[in-house]
Amino acid sequence: MTDLAVRPMALRRPDLSATRLRRRYAAERRFRFYGILAVAVAAGMLGLLLGSILYKGYSAFYRTEIALPVNFDPAVIDPAGTRDPAVIAAADYAKIARDSLNARFPDVSSRADRRALSQLLAAGTDLRLRAIAMKNPAIIGTTATVELAASDDVDMLMKGRISRAVGEADRTLTDKQLAWMDELEADGLVAYSLNTTFFTAGDSREPEEAGVLGAFIGSILTMLVTLALAFPLAVATAVYLEEFAPKNRWTDLIEVNINNLAAVPSIVFGLLGLAIFLGFFGLPRSAPVVGGLVLALMTLPTIIIATRASLKAVPPSIREAAYGVGASSLQVVTHHVVPLALPGILTGTIIGMARALGETAPLLMIGMVAFIVDVPKGFTDAATVLPVQVYLWADSPERGFVEKTSGAIIVLLVTLILMNGIAVFLRRRFERRW
Amino acid sequence: MPNVTFLVATLLLATVAFVIGRRRAVEVGGPRRRDLHSLPSYYGLYVALWCGIPALAVGALWMMFEPGIVDSLVLDALPAGMVPADPHQVSFLQTAIRRLANAAVIPSDADPALIAAAAHYNSLQQTASLALAAVLLAVGIVGLVWARSHISPAMRARNRVEKLIMIALFVCSCLSVLTTIAIVLSLIFESIRFFQAVPITDFLFGLEWSPQTAMRADQVGSSGAFGAVPLFLGTALITAISIVVAVPIGLFVAIYLADYASPRARAVVKPLLEILAGIPTVVFGFFAALTVAPFLRGLGGSIGLDVASESALAAGVVMGIMIVPFVSSLSDDVMNAVPQSLRDGSAALGATKSETIRQVVVPAALPGIVGGVLLAVSRAIGETMIVVMAAGLAANLTVNPLEAVTTVTVQIATLLVGDQEFDSPKTLAAFALGLLLFCVTLVLNLVALHVVRKYREKYD
Amino acid sequence: MAAIETLVPPAKVAAAGAGSPVTVEARDVNVYYGEKQALKQVDLDVRRHEVTALIGPSGCGKSTFLRCINRMNDVIEGCRVTGRISLDGEDIYDSDLDVVALRARVGMVFQKPNPFPKSVYDNVAYGPRIHGMAANRGELDEIVANSLERAGLLKEVRDRLNDPGTGLSGGQQQRLCIARAIAVNPEVILMDEPCSALDPIATARIEELIDEIRANYTIVIVTHSMQQAARVSQRTAFFHLGELVEAGDTPEIFTSPRDRRTHGYITGRFG
Ligand SMILES: Nc1ncnc2c1ncn2[C@@H]1O[C@H](COP(=O)(O)OP(=O)(O)OP(=O)(O)O)[C@@H](O)[C@H]1O
Ligand SMILES: [Mg+2]
């Protein structure tokens, strides 16, 4: 091709024959089809993901309960008849629960069988009975029908998550336990109701006693710290860089830095938190304050970039008009530019916070994976957050935790959707086209 | 929440300072306030800043160091022998003490030593709070009085306030650089300690990775246990799978959206992608581990292939799906930057849409797309949760996507979760891996950002 | 299936007169951008091997009309064309008609040079490749060489064939775009203000070029320069506010326009 010679040549016309055109259009259709296919794959995977989680998780929100006549036997609860709360609180309610089951199945006599029978009820049954007795001491000495949560294995069975078809050795419930449940069900004693434990409890080793409240509060505390730190810092940085910064090496460096930080793997921020906040400053492990700090550093670049974009979108004419009436540059920015850019800034902030809310890896590094039963009360209490709770439960071998994991994911996703919904609303409501 | 109380108190103090400053300005300004250089509220703000900022700074420093100091004081006061050697246990002990200290009712079965410690903790905490209150008040009032004494009509309060605010803004903007420095320093220091125990060449070129066995004292630093090549290979394998999935899908999604989709289709597909982009990675990890991996295993089994239950394929495919919105939005951006005039030019020559896209738009956008793909690679390399949940821990030296491999991020996470001995090579190895991860992604990001920026300048 | 014809040497068509057959025939053409009507009832004949100039004030619909002829308006959302435009007697808005084939027959050169970010060679070879005009590399070379030569560019770029087309000067880029258009050997070439981004010398080159290549093509050119219209065109059409005010032989339009508005425009009194 180095040397093109011009020779007289035949005049060539485009080949517009039907065959060739048909081939080209076939290629066109194929290409378009690939586009649709790609969209379909992405949408299909999303559907599959959400569908599988909904399918696995919807049952976390209700639970199986067994209605049993419970004899609040004064001999067990309060033999002296003092009705002293301390005495009532210390009684052996597990025995009361066992007794009521035994009363329902009088033929079960062997020790092993009785133990198996008592395993039909949730591990926290005694606590529930105690709560009833504490709240209403008058019930002591009477027999009341109480709807008691079933154990996770029974729960799984009744929700159809455990197959009866497999051999006894391959399932967690014995044939006898199945038969008892069948009997209870035939008597109409099995019912389903809202799983309040799931929304009001912290973590637990027993699936039926585990709830998301602890993680949810942990998430809120962590997000509060993140928001309190990231928002002002990010807005200040963005305003400085966009409105005041001179163009020099240092500001270039800051810019490159911010763009790069936005792409640093989140786990590296976890290492930073571990080495600096825990190792160097000695802040407490597993605390929302540390989690919030780490996530704030991680979210900063996102909010800065969004804020800068919406500051940039404010037309220069507004600045000029404000300067024209003698405002100082700071007044121009605080009175005019920032308020006009605020919807965009808030949208960016919410999106950044939503990202932080879903973040897991850096929090593993700073010990927010500990098994924590209590609902955290302050920023320095040991806590975990929703996504970490998901990770912890996903790791648990019990069958019952699969549905709990999916349930927690649903709670997490609903929270995220709400946050993004607010962002979209803000954008729609306040968006200005210049 | 004492911290919040202090914050509110400081803000209140600053408000008082504002009022005092303002009033003073009105006083010195005389009846017409003509002589005042700035509006009175700027004088108020000036005093408030001088009162609030030092107090806040002192408070922040205090809060940073107080828990550590109180904790160690409490530990020191514990009877000898109660403090375990293992730092992990120590932190449990501290939690227990803190819990006792906050408990409304002290359980009857609690260890009396712990109860004493909790009481000690509470009293220390109280002292600390009082001391902090005193210090904050002192600092705030000194600032207030000092600033107030400066107020005179000629003082350019507005300029001073703006100067102060400008400095504050500048300091904020330097924070990002500080973050990077902190990352680099923390990684480097721990890594150096690691490389003192394990030669760097063994780490970079060793073929065997088994940090758990190296926990035994006689094996610490023994060569072979910390050979990271299997991790690199595993990371590369999973990244490659995810890129192979994400780039074609993402690119075609972008093309479809930009050039083929009707406005209605766009209005449906775009939010779908945003949802996909907003799903937390831990959810993808769960999906990979519980849905995709068993499915692939079953599929492989049905055609006679042995697929590991933690196969690289499952993690890679799901990670690819996760990155699709990232790739598609980046390529959408860069393809939109290709001027319409080029598409028109091609169409006017009788090219079909697909010919235009394949032969003009994509080649023109290629640098930008490559930049986007590099960013995607960097994300895939640094992605943690999917691989932690769906890829294995076994450091197999293989490129077979059906087998289990482990990655750099998985190892960082597993090495650091639970155990917190800062000087065992096992923990330090995580920092060395982190340093490596940081460097690799840094280079990728810088190159990608540079390429994309150069590309944008071309069409701006 | 390349049809074999031979190029007519420029000298032979010096005087294409009023007798040449009509290539493009527009009748009752209305164009709407959404609600807004951009062209009203336009009737215009474009004759073979002639240069037809479209003139008129900004926004009067010249580009719109031009883009109707190769259906480039199809890509604009909300644009609607009614009426009849035919190319050699064939209705180009017929639903059976293939747009791709039409655009291969009606080429276009744009106001701003828009070479592809490819090498000079690949820019010119783009059309021939798409349309399967060359069976082998030799033939492709031949087409590229001839097109560059006819666009008067070959000498300047002979040793820069592999350099990106975007690296040429503005005038060279525009000639590259012309070479790119004529490489496909269209019957009609549409030019939308091809010289507006160029200096006078580059403009003169393009005008010469237009005059040379009209021997083999039918050319419609939009221009804002009366002098240019007078220099290069045989026929001129004057548009005003979406209407075709008058069309006729160029000398006639410029010396004795029938319409007041035309007179006003060419004498610079309004527009
Ligand atoms: N894509 C479009 N959408 C809506 N209206 C358009 C569009 N393109 C052109 N118009 C309108 O159609 C009318 C004719 O535009 P056209 O571009 O044809 O004018 P023109 O004669 O080529 O002007 P100029 O000499 O400035 O290029 C104008 O009023 C213009 O605003
Ligand atoms: Mg025009």
Image: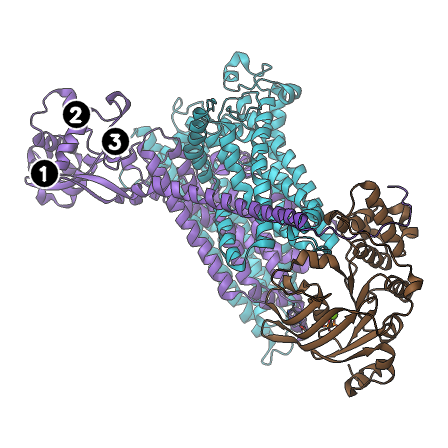
Chain colours: A purple, B cyan, C brown
Occupied quadrant, residue B431: top right
What label does residue A176 carry, if any? 2
Residue position marked by numbered label 1 in the rendering: A69
What label does residue A153 carry, if any? 3
* SS type, badge 1: strand
Residue farthest to the bottom? C260
N-term mark: 3 or 1: 1
Q: Report the chain holding disc 1.
A: A
Across and down, in percent, residue A273 comes to 53, 37
Say which amino acid is labelled 3: Asp
Say which amino acid is labelled 2: Lys
* Nearest-to-viewer mark from 3 and 1: 3
Please tell me how crowded label 2 is: few (under 14), some (14-19), or many (20+) other residues with Cα within 10 Å: few
Across and down, in percent, residue A335 comes to 58, 68
CA gap between label 3 and label 1 equals 22 Å
Up the image or down, A150 lies above or below C268; here it is above
The answer to whether residue A430 is left or right of residue C180 is left
Up the image or down, B281 lies above or below C87; here it is above
Please tell me how crowded label 1 is: few (under 14), some (14-19), or many (20+) other residues with Cα within 10 Å: some
Task: Identify the residue shown where x is 54% and y is 31%.
Answer: B409
